[in-house]
Image (cartoon, helix red, strand yellow):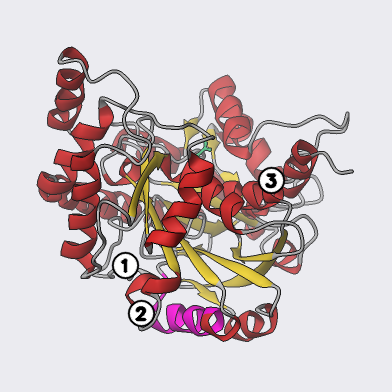
Amino acid sequence: MTLRWRAVASATGLTAPDGLVRPTIFAEMTALAARAGAANLGQGFPDEDGPAWIRELAREAISSGENQYPPGRGIAPLRAAIAAHQDRHYGLSYDPETDVLVTAGATEAIAATVLALAGPGDEVLTLEPFYDAHAATIAMSGATHVTVPLVPGERGFALDVAALEAAVTERTRLILVNTPHNPTGTVLSRAELGALAEAAARVDAIVVTDEVYEHLTFDGLEHTPIATLPGMRERTLTISSAGKTFSLTGWKIGWVTGPAELIEAVLAIKQFLTYSGGAPFQPAIARALVEGDGDIAALRDGLAARRDRLVAGLRAAGFPVSVAGGTYFVCADASPFLSPEVPDGAAFARALPERLGVACVPLSAFCREGSPTARALSSWVRFTFVKDDATIDLAIERLSALAR
Ligand code: GLN
């Protein structure tokens, strides 16, 4: 029998030589960065907290006694605000009583969804590279993880549609999409979403979509939820959270929206994972979703400028860069700086904090060990720009040594 924790370690490439589990790539790189005093462009979390007025609402909720278990589905005003948000931004209508579930961040939503809807003998399809938690929860469920490559280009990464057609079969139970996409920053186009939707309909698979970077798109690009495509609302569970939208990643307020029967299935698992949580944060996010559009716009504009600053610096240092239209991240090819001593992106990323005082994350950490995509992206690394200007400038200054 495979113990599930070992399966999770192996699915995320974190099995240590002694058979135990290594920390995630984010924790590892953050620790290396701290030890070397490096500018940490590895782990993607904002170094500036979200709007003071939203934080004040949580403080007031604590003082006024909102400190016990909230309802398992989430407090009514937050469910209403989530439903209103989906309607206002995307024209998707959901009943807050039955079609909305509040979770402990998007991570719990993904875990509860995959555990509810897939198991041994099922295949769950994701893009590759994929966010580590997606692979981990598929391993927890006992389902088989199948991937379809994203291929790098100048303007972001593109879905390999032919590979998608081949990978989606009668065994495909879930198609787990992530757009805007971590780690590549890619915002899937309508054509790519259409191909995914068609594939799902062909084999009657359910689509689960992780859209936590939904508001963080640049260059006038707009995020399209796959649930808005014809026929897709009924087979799609849409997951998002407040963490990225309001720079409050530690509050862990996430949600799932979708048809009532599917939400019921997710709730059946979710209520025995955390049951419920984040009592004082829920009312604060309920207000933020209704009144926070100005803050979201300011965050988006600020991030776009910082992305451009980082991309210019990476290019000046000699990296080929794939500039995608969303998220906290840009990907760069470290090929020009590899050598027999530093043979790939993972070695480059591990050496960089000590060598130059900058941290990044290798894309191989988001791939299956030894997969064709892992080989194709073995020289690539991810940098985050959700850091203050001083940190980005320091990193650029330090990386410029590579060009000399
Ligand atoms: N989402 C963050 C990233 O991609 C990290 C989250 C974590 O540390 N697990 O960098």
Q: Nearer the viewer, residue 42 or 23?
A: 23
Q: Which residues are magenta?
A: 188-200
Q: Quadrant of the N terminus?
A: top right
Q: Position of residue 336 (x, y in %)?
A: 64, 59
**Which comes before the other along the chain, label 1 or label 2?**
1
Q: Position of residue 105 (x, y in %)?
A: 41, 40
User: SS class of the residue under badge 2?
Assistant: loop
Instruction: Determine if the magenta segment contains residue 199.
Output: yes
Q: Quadrant of residue 27?
A: top right
Q: Which mark is residue 223?
A: 1
Separation of disc 3 and disc 1 at Cα?
A: 30 Å
The answer to whether residue 212 is seen in the rendering is: no
What residue appears at the point 34 percent right and 40 percent down from the top-left corner?
243
User: SS class of the residue under badge 3?
Assistant: helix
Separation of disc 1 and disc 2 at Cα?
A: 12 Å
Q: How many labels sit on residues? A: 3
Q: Which mark is residue 140?
A: 3
Say which residue label 2 marks. Answer: 229
What residue appears at the point 13 percent right and 47 percent down from the top-left corner?
290
- State left or right for residue 69 relative to residue 285: right
The answer to whether residue 322 is seen in the rendering is: yes
Q: Position of residue 230 (x, y in %)?
A: 35, 83
Q: Nearer the viewer, residue 241 or 302?
A: 241
| Kind of residue indicated by mark 3 | Met
